[in-house]
Image (cartoon, rainbow, N blue to C red):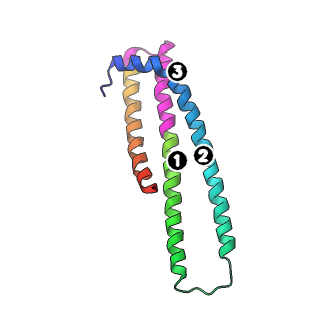
Amino acid sequence: MAYTPEFAEKVIDNGLQQYRDLQNLFRSEQSKFGYFIISLTVSSIAFTVYQTTDEALNIYHSLLGVAIITWGLSVYFGISSIMHTNTLVFHSSEYYAIGFNFKNKKYNKTEVYKLLQEKRKVIDEIKDQYTISGQWQM
């Protein structure tokens, strides 16, 4: 997609509604993050309480170790994915806010074009990181 001044004007025209939608999505993702951390804490406490028995360590506990390691990896990639989603949505909303501010005459077209290009570069970098963490989470 070519990022031309005409494209900047198109972003400006659609900017306000897109900005509001992205802000709502950002708030939704933040609440998902909070609930994920809460459920993670509760499940780890329940797991610890359940596993604290007077058993001696034997070979069968190695499967438990593998389960804990894979659980840890899942938690890491899950949190990473949620953080990348929040960052991506935040920068996307800023992307549309640039156009909205231009509509209110705070920037000229050349500045908007440069700001949109810079913000798009940041969004593309975050998108690549998000893709990697999302693939490993699944």
Above or below: residue 119 compared with residue 68: above
Observer able to see residue 14: yes
Instruction: Please tell me in which quadrant of the rendered image residue 26 appears.
Output: top right
Q: Position of residue 59 (x, y in %)?
A: 52, 85
Q: Position of residue 46 (x, y in %)?
A: 68, 67
Reading the image, the residue beneath label 2 is: 32
**Is 135 in the magenta?**
no
Q: Residues within 10 Å of mark 3 (few under 14, many from 20)?
A: some
Reading the image, the residue beneath label 3 is: 16
Please, what is the three-letter code of the amino acid marked with disc 1? Ile
Reading the image, the residue beneath label 1 is: 82
Q: Is residue 96 left or right of residue 31?
A: left
Give the residues in magenta.
Answer: 88-111
In front: 116, or 25? Answer: 25
Above or below: residue 54 compared with residue 114: below
In front: 118, or 83? Answer: 83
Q: Secondary structure at mark 2?
A: helix
Look at the numbered discs 2 and 1 and tell me whether their residues touch, using CB distance below 8 Å: yes
- The Cα–Cα distance between marks 3 and 2, rounded to whole angstroms, is 25 Å
**Is 104 in the magenta?**
yes
Please, what is the three-letter code of the amino acid marked with disc 3? Leu
Q: Which residue is at a point 49% across and 66% down the rendered structure image? A: 70
The disc, 2 or 1, on the residue closer to the chain's N-terminal end is 2
Q: Main secondary structure of the magenta part?
A: helix
Q: Secondary structure at mark 1?
A: helix
Q: Position of residue 57 (x, y in %)?
A: 58, 85
Observer able to see residue 111: no
- The Cα–Cα distance between marks 1 and 3, rounded to whole angstroms, is 25 Å
The disc, 3 or 2, on the residue closer to the chain's N-terminal end is 3
Please, what is the three-letter code of the amino acid marked with disc 2? Lys
Q: Is residue 8 left or right of residue 14?
A: left
